[in-house]
């Protein structure tokens, strides 16, 4: 288990709480944010403690895709796992083309989540 | 009408009325004659061999503009207008030399101030031995008559022109035939005139219709025939206008639509005259059918996408709590560890998780049925998609009386997108704009669609001049089930938002500086990052 923090960003409070709880149960450090803006507010130049991001694609205000683009422009490069409640192959392809680790379609089981997170953290420590 | 030569007064006997004195009546007539001739409404005159006047009546003197008395003993040249005297002299000399009369000689003065035309007959006056001793002239001013004739000619000309125009129009009308037919009182019907278009409308020749009117009746498609014939008979009976659309079968077997309108009137002989026009409306009919088809297609696509959007929204709304349930169940199970005491608790948590997954599968399957995910991304020029939509909107624009203008930036870079879905986006934005102008006067209803290339993205702007969007609604406009319209489901714009997002684009609304609002969306061009 990595000592880096997993940041979960989702506007749905129940999802945010449930996912954070599960990841913590597994022993990960987790920070939860109800919006992209709140995540950005605490983001500093030193982002080495952040292991990966779990981002909901559809959020009011700034969407997951927009957040991803912004991070790219500001030289913050984290492995990203997109979460989506509407899914669709197009979205998946686009997200993958953009360099996402994977796209998890809600509801997803713990096995998928565990694999995705471990892969992301591995990418982070090797990158 | 000119008096014939033998009716003219024998000038040389005027002075010698004594030969008529035997009878009292004749004598008094002889006395009255000189004054009758003097005041006759026709010019009379007589010259001797030197062309000197020996007699002239008032009317002829009037033509010359001098009193009659002044003429006697003076020459023709002295008394006649200089512009005509040469010609006149020639005529007089001709009569003197040849002894031949010159009849109905027309002469017009060239003086623009007093333009006159006279017609004269000049006959020789002979002595007892038959030698020509003078010339007798009978002259009439026909200036007015000429004017009437000219006017009459004008009228005739314009009548001729109108006739030519009518026939010309009748013959030149594309896919139309003008006709006139008569219904004699005893029954029987026949064409008396058909314009050239007859072949374009019926496939029959004019000769065929004119000689055999039953050919016309027989070409009406059988199912339509009884109704048409009844209606026509009714029109002939009541003199009401006839106006029907029906099908005709051409000699080549093809069936075409035509529209026949005619007016009816009864003539003095009791027959009824039908005058009308027959148009080939096959193309029009087809255009109408195409329009209906495009409208149905529009409705079908709308229904499908709406269903897809409702399902997608529902899926999203349900997937969120399912994710929370699943995560929590898995977290609880993990926290429970391998404690065998709580075996049943572990089982409960497992079943909660499995039920959540099953619910997720159900939702996914429903979504697959609705097939909103079947995107067929292809390289597209957004301008082409806008043009597709213009076609789909055609009938809607007519019905809602909205004017559409396109402003397409040429040479847009291509985007990768699903054509049908993008059509749906532009269509929904347009329908939204059209709806927003519902309460506007027809003259103001104007929708415009503009494409442009902005900051690495292709942008489409759909602008209306409707009611605009309340500031508080600008952000919620694209949310599912949000609607400001009482009858709206709140799905149309939400569909747009989903599709645009799925394509990596952005959608938003702005109120115009003037009336109405503009809805924008952008799509990344191929090769650019969103």
Image: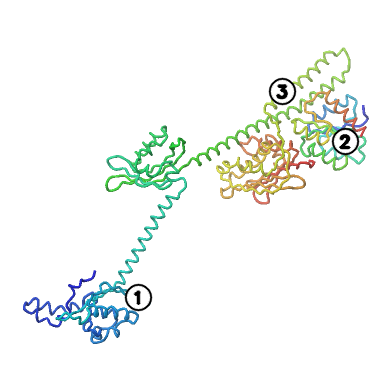
Colour mapping used in the image: rainbow
Q: Which mark is residue B149?
A: none
Look at the picture and state if B309 lies above or below B264: above
Tell me where residue B370 appears, x and y as whole percent.
67, 28
Residue identified by numbered label 3? B362
B116 or A57, which lies in front?
B116
Q: Residues within 10 Å of mark 3 (few under 14, many from 20)?
A: few
Give the secondary structure at mark 1.
loop
Assign the N terminus of chain B to one quadrant of the image.
Answer: bottom left
Marks 1, 3 in one chain: yes
Q: How many numbered marks have been drawn onto this rendered protein structure?
A: 3
Q: Residues within 10 Å of mark 1 (few under 14, many from 20)?
A: few
The residue that disc 2 covers is: A78
The mark lying in front, picked from 2 and 1, is 1
Query: Considering only vertical position in the picture, is B129 above or below B330?
Result: below
Establish if B455 lies above or below B296: below
């Amino acid at each position: 288990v990595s000592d880096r923090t997993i940041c979960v960003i989702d506007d749905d409070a129940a999802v945010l709480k449930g996912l954070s709880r599960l990841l913590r149960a597994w022993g990960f450090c987790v920070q939860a944010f109800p919006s992209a803006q709140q995540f950005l507010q605490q983001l500093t130049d030193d982002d080495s403690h952040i292991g990966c991001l779990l981002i909901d694609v559809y959020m009011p205000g700034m969407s997951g895709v927009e957040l991803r683009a912004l991070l790219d422009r500001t030289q913050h490069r984290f492995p990203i796992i997109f979460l989506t409640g509407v899914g669709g192959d197009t979205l998946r392809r686009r997200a993958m083309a953009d360099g996402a680790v994977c796209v998890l379609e809600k509801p997803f089981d713990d096995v998928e989540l565990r694999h995705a997170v471990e892969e992301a953290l591995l990418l982070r420590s090797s990158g | 009408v000119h008096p014939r030569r033998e009716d003219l007064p024998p000038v040389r006997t005027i002075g010698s009325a004594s030969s008529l004195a035997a009878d009292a009546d004749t004598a008094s007539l002889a006395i009255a004659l000189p004054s009758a001739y003097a005041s006759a409404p026709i010019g009379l005159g007589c010259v001797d061999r030197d062309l000197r006047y020996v007699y002239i009546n008032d009317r002829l003197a009037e033509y010359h503009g001098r009193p009659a008395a002044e003429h006697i003993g003076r020459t023709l040249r002295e008394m006649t207008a200089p512009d005509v005297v040469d010609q006149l002299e020639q005529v007089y000399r001709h009569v003197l030399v040849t002894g031949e009369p010159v009849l109905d000689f027309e002469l017009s003065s060239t003086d623009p101030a007093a333009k006159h035309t006279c017609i004269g007959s000049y006959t020789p006056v002979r002595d007892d031995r038959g030698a020509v001793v003078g010339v007798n002239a009978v002259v009439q001013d026909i200036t007015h008559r000429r004017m009437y004739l000219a006017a009459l000619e004008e009228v005739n000309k314009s009548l001729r022109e109108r006739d030519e125009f009518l026939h010309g129009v009748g013959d030149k009308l594309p896919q139309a035939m003008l006709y006139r037919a008569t219904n004699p009182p005893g029954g029987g019907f026949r064409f008396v005139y058909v314009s050239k278009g007859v072949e374009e409308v019926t496939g029959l020749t004019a000769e065929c219709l004119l000689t055999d009117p039953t050919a016309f009746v027989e070409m009406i498609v059988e199912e339509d025939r009884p109704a048409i014939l009844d209606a026509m008979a009714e029109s002939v009976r009541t003199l009401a206008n006839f106006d029907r659309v029906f099908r005709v079968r051409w000699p080549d077997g093809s069936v075409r639509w035509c529209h026949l309108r005619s007016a009816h009137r009864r003539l003095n002989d009791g027959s009824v005259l039908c005058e009308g026009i027959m148009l080939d409306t096959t193309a029009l009919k087809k255009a109408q059918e195409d329009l209906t088809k495009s409208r149905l297609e529009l409705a079908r696509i709308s229904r499908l996408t709406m269903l897809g959007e409702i399902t997608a929204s529902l899926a999203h709304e349900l997937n969120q709590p399912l994710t929370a349930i699943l995560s929590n169940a898995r977290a609880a199970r993990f926290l429970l560890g391998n404690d065998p005491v709580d075996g049943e608790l572990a089982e409960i948590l497992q079943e909660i998780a499995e039920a959540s997954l099953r619910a997720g599968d159900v939702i996914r399957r429903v979504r697959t049925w609705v097939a909103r995910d079947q995107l067929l991304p292809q390289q597209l020029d957004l301008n082409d998609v806008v043009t597709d939509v213009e076609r789909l909107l055609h009938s809607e624009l007519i019905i809602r009386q909205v004017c559409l203008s396109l402003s397409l930036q040429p040479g847009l870079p291509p985007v990768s997108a699903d054509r049908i879905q993008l059509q749906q986006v532009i269509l929904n934005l347009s329908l939204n704009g059209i709806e927003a102008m519902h309460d506007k006067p027809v003259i103001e209803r104007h929708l415009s669609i503009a494409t442009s290339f902005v900051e690495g993205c292709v942008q489409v702007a759909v602008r209306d001049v409707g009611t605009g969007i309340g500031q508080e609604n600008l952000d919620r406009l694209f949310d599912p089930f949000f609607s400001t319209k009482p009858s709206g489901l709140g799905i149309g714009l939400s569909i747009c938002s989903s599709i645009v997002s799925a394509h990596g684009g952005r959608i938003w609304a702005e109120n115009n500086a003037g009336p109405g609002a503009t809805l924008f969306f952008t799509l990344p061009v191929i090769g650019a990052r969103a």
